[in-house]
Amino acid sequence: MKTNLAGNDLLLLTEKAVWLEYEKTLLIADVHLGKIEHFRKAGIGIPYLATSVTQDRLESLLKKMKPEHVIFLGDLFHSKMNHSFDQFKYLTDTYDKTEFHLVMGNHDIMPTNSYQELNIKTYSELIIGNLWLTHEPQDELKEGLYNLAGHIHPGVKLKGKARQSMTLPCFYFGPQRGLLPAFGYFTGKSLIKIEKNSDTFAIAEDIIFNIKNI
């Protein structure tokens, strides 16, 4: 679904990512690679096949969009190095014409040389035009910039008849700040408070819709 944000044309993808056509750039938040392995090591019985779901979705998206740049808005890896590191190394080696960038998040705790080994450039923040990219949404804004962040794993609850309801991941764009949905398979959702003059785009499998239109 196409939308305009602070003068920028965005393509919202059902894969829970944003495509900037002019810059040939993918924006992706909260991938949390290795999270399932982290929980399995702690004795939580998550099926092993689930470990590859996020990686496979990411590779499919790279094949589909052929980006020149991929910018991760934090929490690319869930914690310390594990098998997911080698899997991601395969991606960066395979798509060596794509530049990978990481705005560091609270879970990105691996040593700096680990990211260098993956050919990922790391930053505390990035600015593209008037988009200020951070991991966590910022309380103090910069003049003339729109803050786009991850971290929250935004979700929206939709209510139906007879007390029926469902919570869906969403893109949320408020007057001054926006949130990207968590890309990772096993990440959960946090209900957001919707401000006036905002747009919330819910993701229902292969459909994206503005909740204002339902």
Image: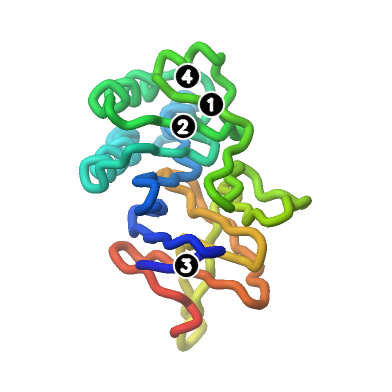
Q: Amino acid at mark 3?
A: Asn
Q: Residue at x 28, y 28 (%)?
A: 97
Up/down of 115 relative to 31, above or below:
above
Q: Mark 3 to mark 4: distance in Å?
A: 33 Å
Q: Identify residue for label 4.
A: 115
Q: Nearer the viewer, residue 161 or 213?
A: 213
Would you say the residues marked 3 and 2 are in contact, meaning their CB atoms lie under 8 Å apart?
A: no
Would you say the residues marked 4 and 1 are in contact, meaning their CB atoms lie under 8 Å apart?
A: yes
**Which of the two discs, 4 and 2, sits closer to the camera?**
2
**Callout 2 environment at 10 Å: few (<14), some (14 to 19), or many (20+)?**
many
Q: Mark 2 to mark 1: distance in Å?
A: 6 Å
Q: Quadrant of the C terminus?
A: bottom left
Q: Position of residue 34 (x, y in %)?
A: 43, 29
Tag 1 secondary structure:
strand
N-term mark: 4 or 2 = 2
Q: Identify residue for label 2.
A: 101
Q: Identify residue for label 1.
A: 122
Residue 4 got which mark? 3
**Callout 3 environment at 10 Å: few (<14), some (14 to 19), or many (20+)?**
few
**Which of the two discs, 4 and 1, sits closer to the camera?**
1
Up/down of 8 relative to 77, above or below:
below
**Which of the two discs, 3 and 4, sits closer to the camera?**
3
